[in-house]
Image (cartoon, helix red, strand yellow):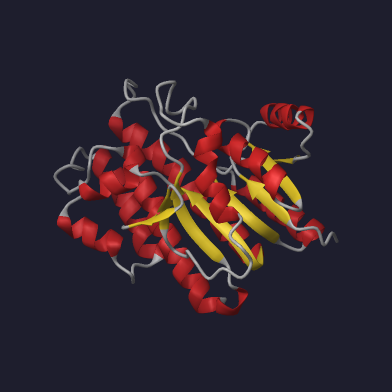
Amino acid sequence: MSSTPVALVTGGNKGIGFAIVQALCKQFTGDVYLTARDPGRGQAAVTKLHEEGLNPLFHQLDIEDLQSIRTLRDFLKEKYGGLNILVNNAGIAFKVADTTPFAIQAEVTMRTNFFATRDVCTELLPLIKPHGRVVNVSSMVSVSALARCSQDLQQKFRSDTITEEELVKLMTKFVEDTKNGVHEKEGWPNTAYGVSKIGVTVLSRIQARMLAEERKADRILLNACCPGWVRTDMAGPNATKSPDEGAETPVYLALLAPDADGPHGQFVSEKKVQKW
């Protein structure tokens, strides 16, 4: 078994994920895994980084496939005995002009951004080693979407005692409400992406709380962050940041000093803790 520290980025073949892998290869002393759903695209991304003199490794990961997550989990367990850094970056967004019915957009977006990210956490968080770092890439859109929720929903999502089970029920309810055409009446905003990222931010707060309760001595730090509005296939060419700039906050959180005691359980943007 290798004693080399190991970092892993989901959705690493392009955009912000690719830039995070690139930065970690330069700044992290250890093995850096670029993961992607499509092995061809993943290998091509790794080759591109090799041409820059960097040495990422590749492992297939489709976050929507539980078997794929568990194969990766077993690989990390056997080869490294765990994981030091996990960056959950993989996610999707429908374009504004997309004509796919809203209920379908809601279901697909929620399945990837919230439920699949949660599955990765369920399988990989137990592998995180002492002083490990976990970064869940969320979005400022979660903050604006939260502000557009009903007071009742806002209270639930801001609660310091909400459980993962309660959060899952709420995310499921949003999808059901869109199918029944009552999501606005039920207090939800008109953004599937925004609600899915509320899920990611609140999940991060819950996970951080559990780590503080169950593994306090391990000093693991887990946060959600917003990379900013970044020029990627997702956000389009008019966004204000380059992928490298978008990677700055996630990489900062991934590389928090071993003796750091925070931030933990926070929502971070531009390397600053934001009010949730």
Q: Quadrant of residue 19?
A: top right
Q: In this view, does 16 lie above or below 67?
A: above
Q: Position of residue 271 (x, y in %)?
A: 46, 51
Q: Which picture quadrant has residue 131?
A: bottom right
* Left or right for 242, reference 106: right
Residue 102 x %, y %: 29, 31
Q: Which residue is drawn at 45% across and 28% down?
A: 234
Q: In this view, does 256 lie above or below 31?
A: below
Q: Where is residue 98 in the image (x, y as percent from the top left)?
A: 34, 22
Looking at the picture, how far across and down is residue 23, in whole percent? 64, 42
Residue 214 as seen in the image, left or right of residue 108: right
207 lies above or below 174: below
* Number of numbered discs visible in the structure rendering: 0
Residue ID at (64%, 56%): 85
Where 242 sits versus 216, above or below? above
Picture residue at 34% right of the left edge, 63% below the top: 166
Q: In which quarter of the image is the N terminus?
A: bottom right
Q: Which of 138 and 254 is in front in this view?
A: 254
Residue at 32% over, 39% down: 192
Residue 153 in view of the camera? yes
